[in-house]
Amino acid sequence: MKFSLASFLLIINFIAGAQSLTNENLNHLYNPADEVDLEWNMVKQNGQMNIYYALTITGTGSSPEMYRMQWEERDSFSQRSGKVMRSDSLLLSPGSRKMGVFVVDLKNDPWMLLLTITKVTTSTTWSYPFMIEKNYPVNGLIKRGEQIVLKPYLELGEQYTVQGPSMASNLYVFRYRQSFSSAFPPFSKSTAGADPILLPDSSFTISNGSSLTFSQEGLYLIQSDTTAAEGFSFRVHTSTFPRYTRVQDLVDPLVFVSTQDEFIQLQQSNGDKVVFDKTIIGITRDRDRAKRFMKSYYTRVELANQYFTSYKEGWKTDQGMTFIIFGLPDEIRKTSQNEIWYYKDSRTKFVFIKKGSIYSPNYYTLMRDDRFTQLWYNTIDLWRKSRF
């Protein structure tokens, strides 16, 4: 039997490409410098799972490129290849944004939906796994105008449309104003996981599909049935979030790098920029180092808020804290229940376990260990000397 060269190369590429997702580096999920950015929101509706997405090409070139967007069904993360459900070719220019929805049926057993985006000219591939589970709690969404909101935070004072399950007439809105605690260092024996039951500070009822303007910050949960473990939640913040611009907002994220006395002094500054700046210069021991510190540190705080905001601000989560202090991991591996972050220079591995709740289905907590103690303090010392 004779094979053409094209057929031979196709077979070779298929064999090379067929691999378990557990062996693939997924650090592009949190890499702001990557040329592909994907935002998404999974919503359970009418016995199906809707994956709403927005694909943005963030490159700096000017010419359009061809990308292949492929959806594949697999039984698990360890399966090397699966069934292709759909494949589309997209001609996209840098700065362009492609929005859509992909709908799959729910099954009794969990399974994995894998989205791969491939740049045709270079064969560069980005993978995005979605665990499809029948008991996934999110059963509603928010719209701003005609567009689905994909981020887990809304803007204070803006008008949104709240859409719950199609069969529901009314929706119950619960607001939690409490300030959730920030993550503890990776060697601490204490944790700050999601509370299984939170007591709302206020509640009200609205008609399904009605418009709503949020006038107070905080965590919100919306349910059509208050006796069921289903609903959808989000945070409401000022228009600058995930970036912090007010002095009073800049203080709390410094808990990771300041001493107890310094942090008290920052808290007592009450938004006074002169006192705040003086304390930062006292930490870094130099005005120029203070400027570099502020730029580097709060860039990571903003990214942590962007990537990891859940029932609380992203910088307060275990993943957010790790991202701020240690930066983007060199490698990220995923399974159905954990994420593993690898840092090559320090030969360090952080394991995050999925501990989702109705308030945050994809929330992860860090497996803490005493062996992280010296690494933590050495890295904090580098931050205080502005060597990042």
Image: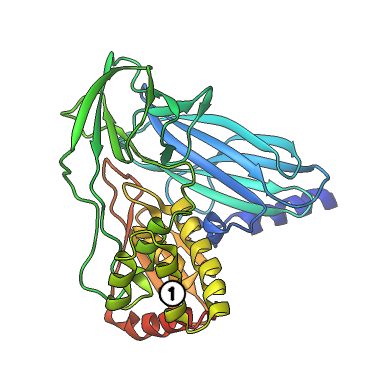
Quadrant in which the C terminus is drawn:
bottom right
Tell me the residue that label 1 is attached to.
278
In this rendering, would 210 be left or right of 188?
Answer: right
Q: Pointer 1: residues within 10 angstroms few (<14), some, or many (20+)? A: some
Residue 301 is situated, as x and y percent measured from the top left of the image, at: 46, 60
Q: Pick the residue in front: 193 or 132.
A: 193
Looking at the rendered structure, the kind of residue marked 1 is Lys
- Quick one: SS at disc 1? helix
* Residue 350 screen position, x and y as percent: 39, 70
In this view of the protein, can residue 185 be seen by the observer? no
| Residue 223 image position (x, y, % from top left) | 26, 28
> What residue is at 46 percent from the left and 72 percent from the top?
326
Q: Position of residue 30 (x, y in %)?
A: 52, 57
The vertical placement of 194 against 204, above or below, is: below
In the visual, does 108 lie left or right of 54? left
Q: Residue at x 41, y 79 (%)?
A: 380
Residue 83 falls left or right of residue 227: right
In this figure, what is the number of numbered marks?
A: 1
